[in-house]
Every structure is written in C-alpha cells, then in structure tokens.
Amino acid sequence: MLMDIVGIVIAFSVVMLLLSLMVTTLGQATQAAFRLRGRNLKTVLAVVLDPALQGQPESRSLAAEVLNDDEIASINKVTNPHSSVAKFRGPAVSWVDPDTLQKVLTRISDMDADTDTQSVESVVNRFRGVDKHLSNRFTFIMRLVAVFWALVIAALFQVSAPTLIQQLSTDPELREQYAALAPDVLQFAEDTDRMIAEYQPLFDNALKTMAERHPDLANDLAAVDTATPYLGDVSEELSDIIDGVENQDQILAELEEVMYSDVRRHRDEMLQRAAESQRYLSLIDITPYRYGNRFYYSQGVIQFANILGVLMTMILIMLGGHFWFNMLKTAVSFRDLLAPTSAEIKAKESARNEP
C-alpha cells in the first residue's frame, strides 16, 4: 500500500515538474524576447522624470527618448523611439548609470528653456533611490508572466490534477509508465536549472567572451568588478581601465553587443527547453488539447469539474520547478529505500519453497 502511494507521488510529480519547467522556460524566454527589464526601467524612469504625470504618455515619450540617446543606447539605437515597432519591442537598455543620466538630461535642459539645472539634479537624485523599487516591480512582473503561462499550459494540455490523481490511483500500469520517466526528468530539470543559473552572471560570461576575442586585454578585463546588476557600471569601469586604448569605444560597444547576444541566445535556449518538456509529456500521452473543446464544454453543458481541475493544476504548477524537483527526488529516494533487496526477495522465495 505504501509503495503504491509513493508510486502515485512519483508519477504525479513527474507531470507537475515537466509542466513547471515549461512555465519557467517560457517565462525566461518571454522576459528576453519582450525586453521586460527595459520596459520596467522605462516605466519607472517615466515616473522619476515627472512624478506629477505618474508615467503618462508624455513622460513615457521623454523616457523613451532618454533611453535612446547616443550616450545611453550605444548599440541597438532606433531611428524613432516613438514608433509602434519601437514601443512593441521595448528599449534594449535595462539600466542607466545615474551619472550618465545626468549628462543626458543636462544636455536636454540646455536645449529646453523650461528645464533648469536644479530640476535635473532632482530627477537624478530620485533615480538613485529607485533600485529596490525597480527590483520589486520586475519581480512582480515576472510573477504575472508565470501566472499567465501556468494558466495557458494547464489549459492547453488539459491536465486536471484531481482526475490525474484518480487515474494514477486506479491504473498501476499508467503509474509505472509515468514513474519510469523520473530519472530522465530529474536530469533534465537539473540541466535546465544549470542553464538558467549560467545565464545570471551575464557580466562574467560577457567579459570571458571579450577576453577570448581580445587576448591582449585579458588582464584588464579580469580586473573589472562584476559584482553589480548594472551594465552601465561594468561599461564605465572598463572604460576607465582601458582609457587610452585604441578603439576604446568600439570595444565598449562590442561588450554590450555580447551582452545582448547572450540575451537572445538565452531566449532561444529556453524555447528549446520548453519544446523538450513537451516531448517528455508526449511520451506519457499528454499532448496539447488532446480532448478538444469537449473537455470544457460538452453537449451544451459547461464541464465545471474539468475547469476547476485545470485551475488546481495551475496553482500546483505555480509552486515552481524547485518544489516539484525536490518532491520527485525525495519520493524516488524513499521508494528505493522501501524496495526489497535481491537478497530479501531470494530469502522470501526460499521460505515459500521450503516444505
């Protein structure tokens, strides 16, 4: 009886982990593809520029112009930051150094009689204090993205948690089929988590790539302090270190290009991991929209039980990949402890065969 319960937990955790990994990877791909960090910066900067407007279109337009300035957008600069395409794609810049922002705003104020030096300093001082707000707001945005993808994935694959548990409880063969994937799914989850973790230290990776391209600058690049979440700080420090080096501006622009290339690469890798999660699910016959519309609406009747089951699945998915990874790993270890050894099996067979 206990082994059956453990088997149900393993099989159920396999499905939840795969769905959670799909949500995580799609969330990461969404963040990279839609430049959510840049959008977050633009929104907060718009409020900082003019708190009275509270980020209304006028302040957003000014924020877009500032983030597209030559001093800030050394690469990926767009011709018209107010175009529909530019608004859809979002700004490529994810952080602005306060000193650089002050230079840009000072230059703008010199061309605008309505803007004085005191107001520029006030804006910059406000901006220096938004680090925590930027981080909290971005975390909130990513949670909303995760909720969106969790609902989409649960509804698309039509997985009802109560129904799945009932099926696993009454069908030992199905339970074994799902549980057989556990080792591969655990390894897949570890690989995915490592890929996401490797993406986090972008500055270290970018400087390593730059050192490979410019061996003569390897010592200078190694001296750059990357213990900062901001590209502007890294670029500024590198600029000071290589001051006077030939093609200094080209090297700094290349560093930023490497950074953005890593973002695009991460997006593509996460989409591939999402596709791999789907492949694993297809091995246990969980495919997109497998029951069709009748899963939600059949013969004029709304299938509330299935809808509630999907919502329950969404909530369980939102527990996250780490939760289901640990759950699956613990259940597999517990099963191995409960499983009888070959010696015990032989001893029982011998006892049965004795007269």
Image (cartoon, rainbow, N blue to C red):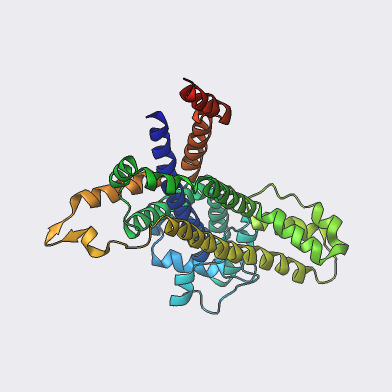
Quarter holding residue 161: top left
Could you tell me which quadrant the N terminus lies in?
top left
In the image shown, does 69 or 208 lie closer to the viewer?
A: 208
Q: Residue furthest left?
A: 300
Q: Is residue 49 left or right of residue 175?
A: right
- The image shows residue 323, relative to residue 112, as above or below, that is above
Query: What residue sits 46% from the left and 69% below the top?
Result: 61
Q: Is 106 left or right of 160, judged from the image as shown?
A: right
Relative height, residue 252 to residue 175 (above, below): below
Q: Residue 264, located in which quarter of the rendered image?
A: bottom right
Residue at the image point whose x is 65% and y is 63% from the top: 259
Residue 117 coordinates in the image, percent (x, y): 58, 59
Q: Position of residue 304 (x, y in %)?
A: 19, 51
Q: Residue 319 in the image: state x and y as whole percent.
A: 42, 42
Residue 115 visible? The answer is no
What residue appears at the point 54 percent right and 45 percent down from the top-left corner?
183
Q: Nearer the viewer, residue 313 or 109?
A: 313
